[in-house]
Image: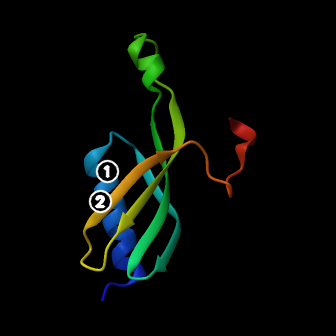
Amino acid sequence: MSSIIDVKKEVVKFLKENIKCYDVTVIKIEKVNDIWSSVAEVYEDDSFLKSMKLPAKQVRLFYSVKIDANMDITAFERLGSFEGSDNSDE
């Protein structure tokens, strides 16, 4: 049985290894029927500015990550927004 701390560490490790990001903050974790569902706030370089060869600017994005009872990542996706976030800087 995995603890919430183990799940948080696995989410941070997975996102840092699989997307180019500077900072990962897990902002939500819940367990439903042996599946851990989490949302992480991530800062990445703006891909549009990068493609235009303009100076980099970090943008805040949200990712959903699901982990099963064996601590295997079963799904992840970038979210358009997170309902609990403050969108005043976007």
Asked if 68 appears above or below 63 in the picture, the reply is below
The amino acid type found where label 1 is placed reads Lys
Circle 1 is placed at which residue position? 16
Quarter-wise, where is residue 14 in the image? Answer: bottom left
Residues at discs 1 and 2 in contact (Cβ within 8 Å): yes
Query: Foreground residue, 75 or 63?
Result: 75
Q: SS for tag 1? A: helix
Q: Residue under circle 2? A: 13
Q: Residue furthest right?
A: 88
Instruction: Return the x and y of residue 83 as percentages of the image width and height.
Output: 68, 54
Q: Amino acid at mark 2?
A: Lys
Could you classify mark 1 by the number of other residues whose Cα lies within 10 Å: few (under 14), some (14-19), or many (20 or more)?
A: some
Q: CA distance from mark 1 to mark 2?
A: 5 Å
User: Is residue 75 found left or right of 49 in the rendered image?
Assistant: left
Q: Secondary structure at mark 2?
A: helix
Between 76 and 24, which is closer to the camera in this rendering?
Answer: 76
Residue found at x 41% / y 19%: 50
